[in-house]
């Protein structure tokens, strides 16, 4: 048995040495992708940075790249890659990993749960939002008066999912709804359908039409109706 192994070993080595090299990614294709990201891919205030390509298209030459419709800041997504024109256009969906960089408000130190946010607790820092869900903030004043809903580590981004604003209005409260249509300001009386604080976007019922709409709370008495806010 050992003799057979010794005889087959040189043959296996020869096969490995004679095997064709792994497919190299076309340089022009790489350059076109690098140029796409260098041009600045910005989504909801954050800029994308290419981390890696999971699988390249089976082609060569320059490619036109597009960002698909995305929600939030996915760490993994499939870019749309196209080559050719008209009926001869070829299309691929290329899986990639990305960073989403922005200047966001983060915890300047460890913050316990249920703590009221103060300016001394915060700092503005370059942050990667990849894989994060929820609203983030770039200004400290937007967070003053909020409370943490869970412990935060130093450097962790403050989000709508880990902070809350004490309710200014309660479900059932009446509020003045304001809507701007061209140069005309229209008002109506609405009823809160859940508790909310300043800046929250919530469902409110128009007391006259009974229509349920989306509105942003401005203060304890008024809310701005969002365009296309009917649910």
Image: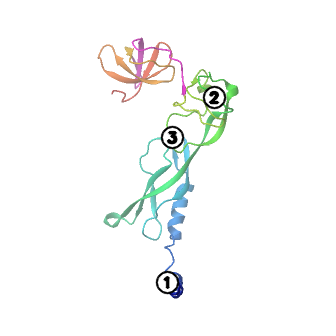
The residue at 47%/67% (across/down) is 62
State the separation of the CA atoms marked 2 and 3.
18 Å
User: Looking at the rendered structure, which numbered label has been put on residue 140?
Assistant: 2
Where is residue 224 shown, x and y percent of the image?
44, 21
Where is residue 221 shown, x and y percent of the image?
47, 12
Judge whether 13 appears above or below 26 on screen.
below
Secondary structure beneath label 2: helix
Residue position marked by numbered label 1 in the rendering: 1
Of 217 and 11, which appears nearest the observer?
11
Secondary structure beneath label 3: loop
Of 44 and 169, which appears nearest the observer?
169
Could you tell me which quadrant the C terminus lies in?
top left
Judge whether 162 appears above or below 45 on screen.
above
State the separation of the CA atoms marked 2 and 1.
74 Å
Where is residue 228 shown, x and y percent of the image?
36, 30
Of 16 and 89, which appears nearest the observer?
16
- Magenta span: 163-186
Residue position marked by numbered label 3 in the rendering: 44
Q: Is residue 188 visible?
A: no
């Amino acid at each position: 048995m050992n003799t057979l192994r010794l005889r087959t070993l040189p043959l296996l080595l020869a096969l490995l040495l004679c095997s064709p090299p792994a497919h190299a990614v076309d340089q022009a294709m790489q350059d076109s992708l690098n140029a796409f990201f260098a041009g600045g891919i910005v989504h909801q205030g954050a800029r994308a940075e290419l981390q890696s390509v999971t699988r390249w298209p089976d082609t060569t030459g320059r490619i036109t790249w597009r960002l698909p419709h995305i929600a939030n800041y996915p760490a993994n997504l499939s870019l749309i890659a196209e080559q050719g024109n008209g009926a001869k256009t070829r299309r691929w969906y290329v899986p990639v990993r990305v960073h989403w960089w922005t200047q966001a408000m983060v915890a300047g130190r460890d913050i316990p749960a249920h703590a009221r946010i103060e300016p001394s607790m915060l700092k503005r820092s370059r942050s990667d939002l990849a894989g994060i869900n929820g609203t983030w903030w770039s200004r400290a004043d937007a967070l003053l008066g909020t409370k943490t809903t869970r412990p935060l580590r130093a450097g962790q981004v403050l989000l709508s999912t880990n902070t809350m604003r004490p309710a200014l209005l309660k479900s059932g409260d009446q509020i003045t709804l304001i809507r701007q249509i061209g140069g005309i300001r229209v008002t109506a009386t609405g009823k809160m359908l859940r508790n909310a604080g300043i800046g929250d976007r919530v469902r409110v019922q128009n007391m006259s039409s009974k229509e349920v709409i989306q509105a942003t709370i401005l203060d304890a008495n008024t809310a701005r109706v969002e365009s296309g806010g009917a649910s």
